[in-house]
Amino acid sequence: KMEQDLAQSLQPGWLGRWEKKIRHLTPGPLIGEGMFGQVRRAQLSTHGRRLDVAAKTVRVEDSQSYRDFYREAAILVAVHQQRNGDGRKSHIIQLVGLITKSVEKYILLEYAPKGDLLGFLRRIGNINEEDLLGNLLGYAVHIARALQELERLRIAHRDVAARNVLITADDVAKLADFGLARDVYATTQYVRANRPGVDELLPLKWMALESIETGEYTCESDVWSFGVLLWEIATLGKDPCYDGRTQLSFLQMVGILRQGIRMKRPPGCPEDLYRLMRACWCDVPATRPTPEGMEKRLMQQR
Ligand code: ADE
């Protein structure tokens, strides 16, 4: 079904407005690399102007990464197609264009000069700024809005985590990486699936219990991951840990979560914020907060 949707959304008509010419792209330095693809900073010339972009490529030999590439392209096209001036800015990374007609294929995204939220959190770790948490919760509000956009489109992101949030030049947090991210960043966070017939690397410690057990992803499972993202914010980018352990196998993770064990309240984390995380980690998906509810609760805590 997904594949069909993808094929459909990538029909020439749909794509026409996004397709760019490879000769208008000037590749620059590598800013991310993984097993299946690369991200380069690049410049796109359009109508005599030069625009900074992040250009994501795919290595053509691999069919899984090819699927991920087209999945990401289709989702971004859908997201930016649907936006019809509801007055609110999108909190999903802006698609600039696609290059699909040359041998080398690219997804072109707005360039986010401040990099990803995880790196940002780790860099500010030693700065003692006043109201640091309040400012960081502003980013969380942005991502709660991104989840509302996805909910309206009935799209699950599947990999909500600080490493997949980008900070733009005007200090807005945007959700990114709808498919390739898992290879581009800290690969050690992805554990091989332990289900028959499934061979993929999974971001175990960000995943809802039901996603680990059944491989199903929903907007509610994204909310679970958002709770882990809040934990990353509250710890300024620590590696999620259960019982002091950061390296957990598939079966250990299932065992821990089934027993009802959850991550502890980080030192200095306000009770309200921890309560919100815990609500995201409810084992019944329908009882987790909605993205809209989370935005409201976060606004109150800032
Ligand atoms: N890394 C991955 N995507 C990026 C983007 N859009 N801007 C900056 N760095 C990135």
Image: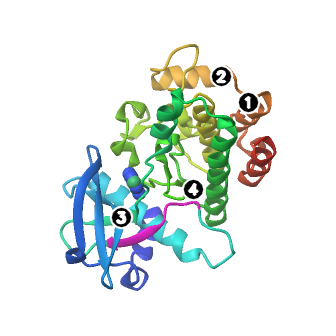
Which secondary structure, mark 4? loop
Q: Please name which of the two marks, 3 or 1, marks the residue nearer to the observer.
A: 3
* Residue 80 point in image, percent of width and height: 52, 72
Name the residue tied to disc 1.
274
Residue name at image x 61 percent, y 51 percent: 218
Which secondary structure, mark 3? strand
**Disc 2 crowd, CA 10 A, few/some/many (<14, 14-19, 20+):** some
Mark 3 residue type: Val
Checking the image for residue 252, the label placed there is none
Name the residue tied to disc 3.
53
Q: CA distance from mark 2 to mark 3?
A: 36 Å
Which of the two residues, 24 or 14, is positioned nearer the viewer here?
Answer: 24
Q: CA distance from mark 3 to mark 1?
A: 37 Å
Which of the two residues, 102 or 251, is positioned nearer the viewer here?
Answer: 102
Residue name at image x 26 percent, y 43 percent: 35
Q: Which residues are magenta?
A: 91-98
Mark 4 residue type: Val
